[in-house]
Image (cartoon, rainbow, N blue to C red):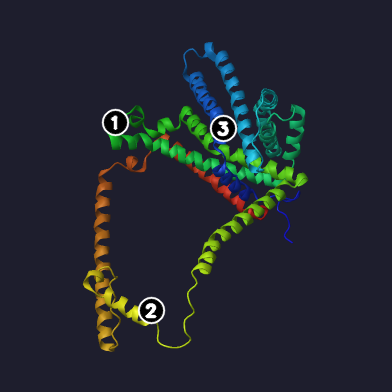
Amino acid sequence: MKKRKTDAGEGKGALELVEEAVQLLRRAPIPVHLFYYIGSVPFVLALLYFWSDMSRGAFAYDRIVGSSLELAFLFLWMKSWQAAGLAILRAHVSASPPPHWTPGRIWRLVVTQAALQPTALFVRPIALLITIPYPQVRAYYENAMILGDGSEGVGAVSRKAWRQAMLWKKQSIFVLLWLLLFGVMVSTNLAIIMEFLPETLRMFTGVESRFSQIDTTDWMLNTTFMAVVAAFAYLCVNPVTKATYVLRCFYGESLHTGEDLMLGMRRAIRAAAVAAAALLLAFAPAAHGADSNAPAPAPASGPAPAGRVKPGDLDNTISRVLKRDIYSWRLPRQQPGKSSNPFAQFLDDTVQKIRDGYHSFQRWLDSLHRARRDYDDMSHAKRDESVGGGFAGFLNFALWAICGIVVLLLVWLLWQNRSAL
């Protein structure tokens, strides 16, 4: 018998869990996405405005207290709406009814998130500096959001979240590595799109903007641009992260409740019932028609009925019809076969080789002409312009090189530990 992948010592593969989370988000109910972005978008926009205002605003010192309080309120707003959406997603995973929201449950949800989530702003950076406990700390705060749906108090939620965070430590590490790699790819794609979007709009619309007039190396190294890229990447990657930890909680609780096995049995029974009903619907009319309109048995010998056509005659008729002019143009061109005469075959091969040699020589002349033209163009251009000198260009190249090295290191680390996946 095959061993369960979700036992206490092994758990699912990290990449398999992330892929399952992506499929879960595709099948998730609309309120899950709606609740998530109702909470996240206002906070992200306020954070970008706060970043820009505190960086460049002339009256930043006067507005810092009020803006900080507004940001703190929107942070709690975001975490509460995300917890409500994850409660619906958790019910969808277990095929149970969606949660019923009462004023008391909403109040407990808000209190739980307000008591636990703000501490992540201090604990998670410290755990990241220490490095070793960061996967468990990250899982604890994600589990606290998932389990803190208002059905229990703060203490019970905290204990359950920590117990779930200590499961499958190796899986937790590789889940973070895969999500980090996914986040780097999404951020890189967003940065490239935002870099070329102003120039693309100028090419298609002819409208000059401030961004198309500025050198890309100037505003790509701007902290506001980096913050915008990070904000959009968060809105794209974080739902996958949340869904991944929802599945971790589901499989972790199933170790004691067996809920994943019962869910699989219910799905199998439902699929069998649907298949049986489909078979009945498919064969019932045919059986009824066969009983009511049964033809008389044909005689054992004698000539064939007048209305029956022999298969050979039918094929000959179809071939004759297809050879008519009105249908022959639709047929593919038939390639002539090789001649059986050795001398004729030798002449055909010789002509084909001469033709191929002529085409190769013509392509070689074209390449020489293009190389000569490119050399002439380069000789008239300045060397620093062709290479792209300057400190800004070197810094941009160095940043991209560092990002590429980080991605290669992550891929190498995942490959070295592929047995754990």
Mark nearer the N terminus (2 vs 3): 3
Mark nearer the N terminus (2 vs 1): 1
| Separation of residues labelled 2 and 3 (CA atoms) | 67 Å
Residue located farthest toward the left when viewing the structure as drawn: 325
Label 1, on which residue? 207
Q: What label sits on residue 36 in the rendered view?
A: 3
Which sits in the foreground, 55 or 335?
Answer: 335
**Figure quadrant of residue 386:** top left
- Across the whole image, how many numbered discs are drawn on residues? 3
Q: Is residue 245 visible?
A: no
The spot of residue 133 in percent (x, y) is 71, 38
Of helix, strand and loop, which one carries label 3?
helix
Q: Looking at the image, is 81 positioned above or below residue 311?
A: above
Query: What residue do we see at 64% from left, 48% from top?
Result: 14
**Figure quadrant of residue 66:** top right
Of helix, strand and loop, which one carries label 2?
loop
